[in-house]
Image (tube, rainbow, N blue to C red):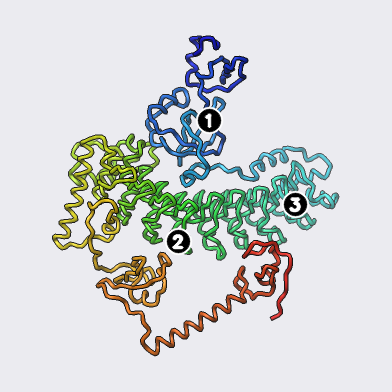
Amino acid sequence: MQEGHGGWNPKMAEYICRIGTVHRITDRGDVRVQYSNNIRWTFHPGALTKVNTFGVGELVKVLDELENVKRLQAGHGEWTDSMTPVLGQVGKVLKVYADGDLRVAFGGQTWTFNPACLMAQPAEVDANLMTAENPNESGSTVISVLEKLLSQSTEQDNPGRLVIEAAHGSANKVRELVQKYPDKVDIKNQGKTALQVAAHQGHTEVVKTLLQANSSVEVKDEDGDTALHYTAFGNQAEIARLLLSKGANVNVLNNSMCTALHIAVNKGFTDVVRVLTEHAADINLQDSYGDTPLHDAIAKDFRSIIEILVVVPNIDFTQQNHRGFNLLHHAALKGNKLATEKILGRARQLVDVKKEDGFSALHLAALNNHRDVAEVLIKEGRCDVNIRNNRNQSPLQLAVTQGHTDLVQLLVDEGADVNMEDEDGDTAMHVALLRPQLANVMLTPSAGGSSTEEGSEGCSSTSLYCRLNSSGLLGNTELNVAMAIACFLAQEGADISYANHKGKSPLDLVGDGTMMQLIKNFSEKHRLQRLQAITCGQGLSSASLRRVHTTPNTMTNLVFPTPAGPSECLICSELALLVLFCPCQHSVACEECAHRMKKCIKCQVTITKKIRQDQTEVDCSPGTENSEQHNLLEQLQSRYRQMEERITCPICIDNHIKLVFQCGHASCIDCSAALKTCPICRQTIRERIQLFV
């Protein structure tokens, strides 16, 4: 191609697969390319491939063709086998190098990639994967500014010297200067006031002197930070208390929409956080990322701060950041077990709440390999282990996509349906065998008892290997992670003949005859064990019954009756025989608690029948005079609550309605003062009509 288009020079060979920038296009349409060493070559346009350009913070997906990526990585960060697990994965760009190469974060790891190995991803795609974040914090230049102030001469005689003396903590000099220049008490030097730098440095006497001289606590610097923000940057809890006693606004926002509480949390300054919360700091205010202070504390795993914030009475655990994560979602995403436990303790109703993409907290924990969090959600939160996202994926399928073997075992042991299909009709076993990156990581026993493949996203293979090896079916066979998960699922009752929407069964995806037979052997072992248990009259575990359902397109699974046995009632937490609700088929309450229930607490579907485990129906008819009186009392109480709701402010739910807007909705006087639009219909409030009742 180079003939007649600049020709070929042997030195051009070293630039094959290297990235350059277009310097200019010649009159003949050839491309002049400049490289990082300022060398330029002219190329036929057909000899070049346009490389995607990416910016810091963008999401990118690595190509999943192993040999192609290896070839492209030569001279661009090179290739190591420990990078294999990130093939096909989504990461975030942390840095763009001068030669165009990118530093990309995947969970807790970073790798350098040739941009030709990457594809741009929309922001909403795989946003549920935990990627490294590096938000810019307001006040990052505070220290450098203070260094400049402290290095300035104190001999100068002008009002700006006040800020220098305040930075040095010279209370007497400050007192002299404010007496000499009383109208210059809030003058700025290097963009900072004397009160701000004294608050940051912890010079209590200087702060008191300035406050006595009427220094304003609300003056902001160029970043929008007040003196209270500076106490948070400098970890000065007592000065924060002093400023608040003098009327400082605890909820004032800087240019990044951060309060002093946001800053104190981000810095990990527990004492300042405690002072601010004691002075009624609004814990629900969101910064420019939509994060509340608790979002930040969870991300940085500041345990003492988490314990302070979660008990604040008016905290709103449903508050979502700009990525759609409420506080429980965020705790699951970050793998924060403490925060998960604390949030569930106060707001267990959030356990199955989904983001817009259908991801629940369990989905996020499963996707990001946070086993401890998943266990808390299942055992303490009693979440739905088979909950689906918008792509009909269960937590088990997401754990399989990433090769998180420990989580796969936990979910299956806790009753995950191994035959649930996603939007493509794929079961968890299909997913395992369709992921090429799982086939590139070998499952090996560990001499030390617990090992992790380097770079494999924390995927521990030891326990799964032991469970498979104990079956006696492996022999000397070596398995990759994909085959190991497939064998484990077969052993736990997954249907090896289940056809997806393309008509492919899991066995159709296995090219190796030996491996195909191995999967069949594990499946046969499971079938024989179940038949033996039934023949011997042994009960099957409830988890085993929950996770193996009758499949819609095969007849390979047997249907077994639900065993009679006590389970925990979700209402009273007592072990009892649970009642089956119709039509939703949920069993969540004992007979005593179920007697007065009108809707299922799990799905909110109206109950038409309540069936005991002996198949008799629970009689819910009144039948007695006491029951009629009880129903009458309930009706009267219901009418009273309705009347109370009509006259109660819908915002604070404390005071009675005193004002009506032109749209017909209303509120109390206190709540109305801060309203510009109606909180019900969002119309602009033009009139407020006072009621005298």
Screen quadrant of the C terminus:
bottom right
Eye-nearest disc, 3 or 1 = 1
Q: Which residue is mark 1?
A: 52
Mark 3 residue element:
loop
In 3D space, how far apart are the residues under numbered discs 2 and 1 (Cα atoms)? 44 Å
| Viewer-nearest of discs 2 and 1 | 1
Q: Are marks 2 and 3 in contact (CB under 8 Å)?
A: no
Residue type (three-letter) at the residue carrying disc 3: Val
Q: CA distance from mark 2 to mark 3?
A: 40 Å
Residue 592: where, in percent of width, then height?
35, 77
Nearest the eye: 246 or 425: 425
Q: Which mark is residue 344?
A: 2
Question: Looking at numbered disc 2 in the image, what kind of residue is underneath it?
Answer: Leu
Residue 219 marker = 3
Which of disc 3 and disc 2 is earlier in sequence?
A: 3
Q: Is residue 69 left or right of residue 36?
A: left
Instruction: Answer few, some or many: residues within 10 Å of disc 2's Cα (few below 14, many 20 plus, some between 14 and 19).
Output: some
Q: Residue at x 31, y 70 (%)?
A: 578
Element class at badge 1: loop
Depth check: 397 or 96 in front? 397
